[in-house]
Image: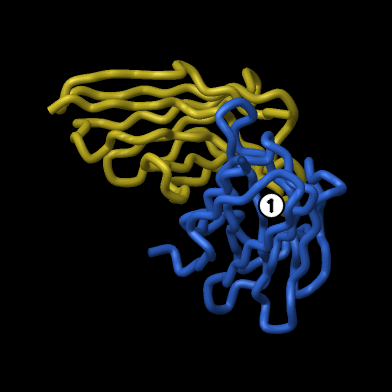
Chain colours: A yellow, B blue
Amino acid sequence: SQQGEEDPQALSIQEGENATMNCSYKTSINNLQWYRQNSGRGLVHLILIRSNEREKHSGRLRVTLDTSKKSSSLLITASRAADTASYFCATARGAGSYQLTFGKGTKLSVIP
Amino acid sequence: DSGVTQTPKHLITATGQRVTLRCSPRSGDLSVYWYQQSLDQGLQFLIQYYNGEERAKGNILERFSAQQFPDLHSELNLSSLELGDSALYFCASSVASGLAGGRTGELFFGEGSRLTVL
């Protein structure tokens, strides 16, 4: 069963614009992670935020976590055509649990 | 390149057959995870091994089995294949086991094995 649900399912933006993707989950978590998948390829880890953190940055990525609302958002600033991919949130439930549960992803298209 | 190697990349077989997918984790990683990705079910966790022992089990069918060998490579065996087993099968590895007090949970994924059952 899916723990995380991304929203929107698909997003199309112009190059240079910002892209925001949201993730909601159901149970308490230890950490939440975002992964990227280019079409038909393996997933690549982008960023991890722990349950006691509220915001984290990595390059053009900004992730927020609201445990009271059981939601997270991923912001990609100044998007590039190369950012075109599917983005997944994944949750790890127990302390040290690495059985990640993935959502169905947001398909981002960045138009040059 | 994640450092995780999966073979074969593509596999086409018939219903009722049995296949074996192989995974070599990143050097130094003790944990191996198997995931199935299909259009309707998304990414489903199947099973995790840590240093040769089964650590966690997810939505893995009884027709499927896995093992991790002393050299830490892992194999996923799929038998009595059905049309619905057609999917991308991913292996991922991490350095830690997932026990309490473990380190961060970043997973490194291979490029997957695309299985088509006809």
> Residue at coordinates 68% horizontally, 40% vertically from top-left?
B85
> Residue at coordinates 68% horizontally, 34% vertically from top-left?
B84
Q: How far across and down, in percent of the image, does residue B117 sit?
A: 62, 43
Q: Is residue B56 visible?
A: yes
> Residue at coordinates 78% horizontally, 58% vertically from top-left?
B100
Q: How far across and down, in percent of the image, does residue A30 sit?
A: 68, 42
The N terminus of chain B is located in which quarter?
bottom left
Q: How far across and down, in percent of the image, does residue A50 sit?
A: 59, 43
Which residue is the site of mark 1? A98
Q: Is residue A100 left or right of residue B51?
A: left
The C terminus of chain B is located in which quarter?
top right
Label 1 Cα neighbours within 10 Å, binned few <14 / some 14-19 / many ≥20: many
Q: Residue furthest right?
A: B62
Residue A106 in the image: above or below residue B70:
above
Q: Quadrant of residue A1?
A: top right
Residue A7 in the image: above or below residue A32:
above
What amino acid is at disc 1?
A: Tyr
Secondary element type, mark 1:
loop
> Residue at coordinates 56% horizontally, 56% vertically from top-left?
B107
